[in-house]
Image (tube, rainbow, N blue to C red):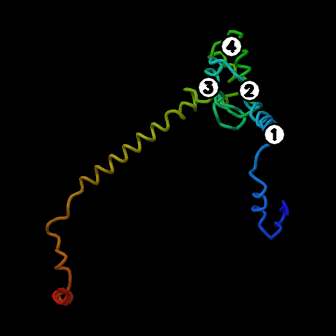
Amino acid sequence: MPKSRTGLGAQNEPLAVSIQAYGSARVRHPFPVLILLLGILLPSSAAAQIFSPEVKKVSENFVCQCSCNHQLSGCGMLHCGSANPLRSEIDQKLQAGMTEEQIVDDFVAKYGGVILSAPTGEGFDLVAWTLPVVALLAGLLVLYRVVRVWTRRRPLPASAPAIAETIPEAYRNRMEKELKDFD
């Protein structure tokens, strides 16, 4: 009597047992599976645009505007609405004979300072470069002063009363008695 594929088998066996009775799981037609895998993997590699090393070098000066916060040269988002057009624009400008500095100046004029991947050395951007260094040096100076004060502290004067002299006589006698009983 053949075993059922759904529910329980003929003798109320679990489904897994009844399926195992029919043999191992085997793909009878591997070509549809291969076509499906190729359909998934090929578009991602085919859609990626290949740019020259010069475009990549120039695009390192800019931040992708798709909110991924990567450099334009490193934005890996497939079909990015920002990186691909900007890289194409850089490629066109390089083919037109513009230098890297000219392209940077053109992009800053067109998109503003937010397109730059690093602050410039002018105005408020100069503060962005120097403030961390100044803060670090100030912190090291404060740390030096604190350590210097701690190491130069003087010990308590020798004329300070000993701890035993500050304990009343009744308590001192009781402590000595309990210590003798403890041994």
**Of helix, strand and loop, which one carries label 1?**
loop
Q: Amino acid at mark 1?
A: His
- Answer left or right for 167 relative to 28: left
Residue at 78%, 58% (x, y): give it. Answer: 19
Dot 2 or dot 3, earlier in sequence: 3
- The residue at which mark 4 appears reads as 94
Rendered location of residue 140, percent (x, y):
38, 43
Label 4, label 3: how far apart the Cα atoms are: 14 Å
Front tag of 2 and 3: 2
- The residue at which mark 3 appears reads as 60
Crowd band around label 1 with a 10 angstrom C-alpha radius: few (<14), some (14–19), many (20+): few
Label 1, label 3: how far apart the Cα atoms are: 47 Å
Query: Total marks drawn?
Result: 4
- The residue at which mark 2 appears reads as 84
Rendered location of residue 134, percent (x, y):
45, 38
Q: Is residue 124 above or below residue 58?
A: below
Dot 4 or dot 1, earlier in sequence: 1
Label 2, label 4: how far apart the Cα atoms are: 15 Å
Rendered location of residue 74, percent (x, y):
64, 30
Front tag of 2 and 4: 2
Dot 2 or dot 1, earlier in sequence: 1
Front tag of 4 and 1: 1
Label 4, label 1: how far apart the Cα atoms are: 50 Å
User: Which residue, as the protein is rendered here, is positioned at the far left?
Assistant: 159
Label 2, label 1: how far apart the Cα atoms are: 39 Å
Q: Do tag 2 and tag 4 residues touch (Cβ < 8 Å)?
A: no
- The residue at which mark 1 appears reads as 29
Label 2, label 3: how far apart the Cα atoms are: 14 Å
Residue at 73%, 15% (x, y): give it. Answer: 92
